[in-house]
Image (cartoon, rainbow, N blue to C red):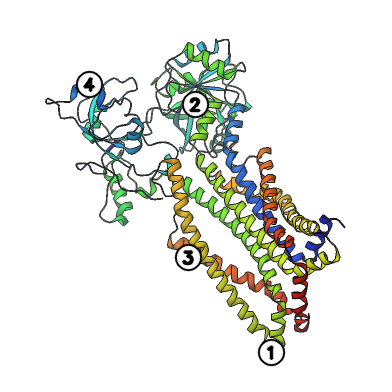
């Protein structure tokens, strides 16, 4: 599942800004109701970015002024100017809920949420993201920070993905479904190849009567099976690639997200072929095996 | 011989292909049944879980989920005020915080600490020992009792973390009055439940008297009780079990319903294509035989119905086999999905539902009919003389 870059982020913003989630997005009003702050004496307002979904839901656009408050009762409301709309990094853990997010500069967020009477500089942040020069050093750097800074818990980003367990379970579930599908397909494939081989019993009988050894015919049947399975596998991949776009488009529309639900990677394609081609060839050989053991005269008999 | 018996003999004449066809339908039918169960299973299981908890309304301070938003102040008084309403049978306030239980050897067990207000019914079932009767009494779940070696009467040392994960308050010692089962317990989760006063003490009186949630049992009409509560306490947010299920359907696990619908469509299409191919190839191999039967006097309708009953037999036997197979498969898949974090022990992804079974039977019946259409058309339009001549010439 991949993310996509911000769609219409304003120029002065970078993707990694402080994020104020729904707790902060409590009082929003469009600029139409805030005409007092527009005009020649318009103060320079701090800027925010709105998630695309929030902007669409509230009918907001760049240039509008919104009111943000740290509490549900609307106390401590402050105006901010919408600098741009951004596409939030898709979060599979929040599937089904609209990301109503506002991004503020960290100092603005701390100013907004500071408790009355609390001195400046005593605020806390929940997380600090660190980019190390060499990603392989992440574990070592985390240990170093933990050693040097008691009270701070550092861990590599790969370990911090709390929802990873859910997706590992989903992966196992989909593998189980795939396994059942393979079993069902194999049974059908075997039934079909038995019928197709049965249709050619006379041909096989004649080939054996004119002197072709069983092994030679079996090799020919195997090659045929390989060709058919390969062609079928490629056709299946083509079908999967077409349905990939269709399924992604449907689920992206359904959940209003940029997440990718189906992704045919080279390794997935290779795995599908590695399973399908030998399975198809094996089914052909298995279906032909009984035929090869019969008497050639009986096979060719009309 | 009637058409069904004739179709049966046609299948028995080719046992390998018939058995494989039936097994194929059984495998596909099992997957189809499971996808139908998955589509509504989670919601149905959630509804059962909520209904069996004995409470049909949930009250919070705002529309945020319990624990994620502000708490209800003076919760015990609010619960008593709500319980006094004529449409309400009972109300109980709950507060949830994290806690660390210290074992005798000094090791720590992370646990959830629940504070429960006084009331005639509590959202738990006592398994051993007795209910919470006095301040300092707690009930623990079986997981914690096993992991910490606790029994009724055992002392329990815990430290609560009431405002953030990083905060650890001074330890308090409470007494285990018994073990209990909690409705939304997740596998491996350790739970301690005491009175609201015990929790306030564990929290050093931080947020004393507050609760995350008030559970309400109505006199039978949840909607009327919700309206009465809303009128009495307009500052609180009331949700009925039905509304909660509605929200759950709209968000949470809609993914499984969607994926169930997609896989149902794919499975039915797959079954349809393959049975059609099986029957078509089978009919093509028997064209001469069918033409001979027609020449002997069997009507067009009769030979067409033979093909149809062949499809019915393959799909019918396969469909019947798919039921036990599907139930076994559902258990296996449920076991996989229940390893997801945060899924309560009593919640299931695959729940048997007569409607799903009826839909399964209907889809298979439609598949049997649709799969037989093309081969039936082949048989119906079979030119008898030409086919027989071709057979003789070849």
Tell me the quarter of the image containing the C terminus of chain A.
bottom right
**Tags 3 and 1 on a common chain:** yes
The location of residue A107, given as percent across then percent down, is 21, 33
Going from N to C along the chain, the mark reached first, 4 or 3, is: 4
- Kindly check if marks 4 and 3 are in contact, taking CB atoms under 8 A apart as contact: no
The foreground one among B245 and A169 is B245
Q: Distance between the residues labelled 2 and 4?
A: 33 Å
Q: Is mark 4 on a helix, strand or loop?
A: loop
What residue did someone put label 4 on?
A117
Observer-side mark, 3 or 2, equals 3
Point out which mark residue A270 bears.
3
What residue did someone put label 1 on?
A211
* In this picture, residue A264 sits left or right of residue A207: left
Point out which mark residue B114 bears.
2
Observer-side mark, 3 or 1, equals 1
Q: How far apart are marks 3 and 2 (CA)?
A: 51 Å
Q: Quadrant of residue B309?
A: bottom right
Q: How far apart are marks 1 and 4 (CA)?
A: 101 Å
Which chain's residue wears label 1?
Answer: A
The location of residue A160, given as percent across then percent down, is 38, 45
């Amino acid at each position: 599942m991949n993310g996509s870059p911000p769609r219409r982020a304003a120029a002065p913003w970078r993707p990694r800004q402080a994020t104020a989630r729904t707790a902060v997005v409590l009082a929003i009003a469009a600029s139409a109701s805030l005409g007092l702050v527009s005009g020649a004496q318009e103060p320079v307002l701090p800027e925010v970015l709105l998630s695309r979904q929030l902007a669409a839901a509230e009918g907001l656009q760049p240039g509008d002024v919104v009111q943000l408050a740290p509490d549900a009762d609307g106390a401590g409301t402050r105006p901010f100017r919408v600098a741009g709309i951004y596409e939030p990094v898709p979060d599979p853990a929040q599937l089904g809920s609209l990301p109503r997010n506002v991004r503020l500069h960290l100092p603005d967020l701390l100013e907004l949420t500071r408790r009355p009477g609390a001195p400046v500089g005593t605020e806390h942040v929940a997380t600090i993201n660190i980019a190390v020069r060499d990603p392989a050093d992440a574990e070592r750097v985390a240990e170093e920070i933990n050693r040097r800074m008691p009270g701070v818990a550092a861990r590599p980003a790969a370990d911090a993905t709390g929802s990873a367990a859910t997706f590992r379970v989903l992966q196992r579930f989909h593998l189980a479904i795939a396994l059942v599908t393979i079993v069902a397909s194999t049974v059908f494939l075997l039934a079909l190849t038995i019928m197709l081989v049965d249709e050619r019993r006379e041909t096989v009988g004649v080939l054996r009567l004119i002197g072709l050894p069983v092994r030679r015919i079996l090799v020919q049947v195997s090659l045929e099976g390989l060709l058919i399975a390969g062609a079928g596998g490629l056709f299946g991949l083509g079908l999967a690639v077409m349905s990939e776009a269709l399924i992604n488009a449907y689920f992206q529309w359904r959940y209003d997200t940029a997440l990718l639900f189906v992704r045919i990677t080279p390794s997935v394609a290779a795995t599908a072929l590695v399973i399908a081609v030998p399975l198809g060839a094996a089914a052909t050989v298995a279906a032909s095996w009984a035929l090869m053991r019969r008497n050639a005269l009986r096979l060719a008999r009309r | 011989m009637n058409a069904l018996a004739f179709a049966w003999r046609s299948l028995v004449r080719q046992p390998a292909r018939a058995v494989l066809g039936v097994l194929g339908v059984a495998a596909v039918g099992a997957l189809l049944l499971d996808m139908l169960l998955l589509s509504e299973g989670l919601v149905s299981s959630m509804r059962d879980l909520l209904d069996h908890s004995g409470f049909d309304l949930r009250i919070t301070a705002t529309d945020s989920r319990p624990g994620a938003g502000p708490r209800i102040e003076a919760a015990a008084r609010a619960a008593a005020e709500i319980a006094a309403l004529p449409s309400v049978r009972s109300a109980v306030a709950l507060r949830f915080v994290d806690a660390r239980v210290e074992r005798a050897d000094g090791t720590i067990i992370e646990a959830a600490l629940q504070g429960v207000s006084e009331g005639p019914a509590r959202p738990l079932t006592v398994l051993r020992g007795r209910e919470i009767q006095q301040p300092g009494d707690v009930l623990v779940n079986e997981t914690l009792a096993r992991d910490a070696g606790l029994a009724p009467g055992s002392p329990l040392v815990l430290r609560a973390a009431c405002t953030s994960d990083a905060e650890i308050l001074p330890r308090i010692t409470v007494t285990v009055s018994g073990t209990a089962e909690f409705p939304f317990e997740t596998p491996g989760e350790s739970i301690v439940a005491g009175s609201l006063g015990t929790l306030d003490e564990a929290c050093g009186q931080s947020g004393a008297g507050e609760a995350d949630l008030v559970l309400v049992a109505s006199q039978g009409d949840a909607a009327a009780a919700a309206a009465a509560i809303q009128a009495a306490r307009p500052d609180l947010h009331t949700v009925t079990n039905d509304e909660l299920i509605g929200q759950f359907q709209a968000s949470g696990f809609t993914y499984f319903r969607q994926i169930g619908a997609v896989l149902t469509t794919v499975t039915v299409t797959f079954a349809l294509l393959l049975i059609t191919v099986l029957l078509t190839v089978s009919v093509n191999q028997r064209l001469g035989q069918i033409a001979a039967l027609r020449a002997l006097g069997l009507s067009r309708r009769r030979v067409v119905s033979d093909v149809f009953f062949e499809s019915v037999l393959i799909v019918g036997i396969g469909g019947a086999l798919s039921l036990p197979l599907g139930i076994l498969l559902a258990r296996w898949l449920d076991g996989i999905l229940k390893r997801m974090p945060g899924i309560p022990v009593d919640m299931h992804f695959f729940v048997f539902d007569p409607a799903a079974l009826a839909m399964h039977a209907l889809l298979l019946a439609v598949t049997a009919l649709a799969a037989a259409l093309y081969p039936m058309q082949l048989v119906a339009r079979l030119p008898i003389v030409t086919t027989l001549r071709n057979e003789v010439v070849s």
